[in-house]
Image: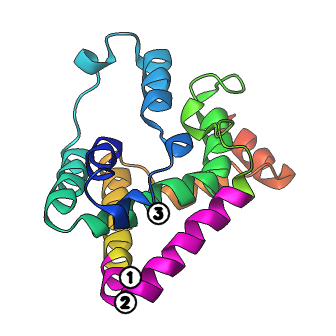
Amino acid sequence: MEREMSRLELTNPQVARFQFQALHRTAALERDLVFLAGKDWRLTVPEMEEGEAYAERVHQVAYTEPVRLVGHLYTRYMGDMAGGQILARIAERSLGLQTGAGLDFYDFSGVEDLAVMKELFRNRLDELGSNSPASCNAVIEEAVAAFQYNIAIFEQLKGNALLSFFRNLPLPWVRAARLKAAH
């Protein structure tokens, strides 16, 4: 996604307005993979069919209808800035990680003010919709597709995001039930 944005920012002003370097996650994700799977993660972590399908979709829309890439940016960045903080805590508890270790993906400390960044992103979405309702509809359709790709990845991992969320809530009765079940 970020590679495609770097390519498009010079040729597509409509999409370039959503190029926010401070939101880029590639380097953070690579640091997490080194921490979690070792420096040879590229050789040892197997590719996932559903992940490959998602990456192919991002690549395809970047070439055929670049404005649709904004739907993926929205899903990834806005979701990670909002619910991603909850997911970081869930991952920390579920994987038994030390605070921050292996969770760089969820660290947006490079963004001076998350609320301002979210507002800027939303304002640009509103401008896109005002200037081109067809583009707005394409972005919405693609955001829905991005959610579907993410669900497929969870399913391939045999994960259940909602169940994991509830199991890891920091509520005493949830923890007590989890501890009781473990004994």
Quadrant for the C terminus in the image: top right
Instruction: Look at 17% across and 51% down and name the residue there.
Output: 56
Residue 21 rendering spot, x and y as whole percentages: 50, 42
Which residue position holds label 3?
74
Name the residue rendered at 56%, 41% in the picture.
Answer: 22
Range of the magenta residues?
A: 116-138
The nearer-to-camera label among 1 and 3 is 1
- Assess whether residue 117 is covered by the magenta stretch: yes
* In magenta segment, residue 147: no
Going 41% across and 18% down the picture, which residue do you hit? 37
For residue 54, side relative to residue 136 (left or right): left
144 or 44: nearer the viewer: 144
Q: Element type at marker 3?
A: helix
Residue 136 got which mark? 1
**x, y (%) of residue 57?**
20, 58
**Badge 2 density bin: few <14, some 14–19, many ≥20, Cα 10 Å:** few
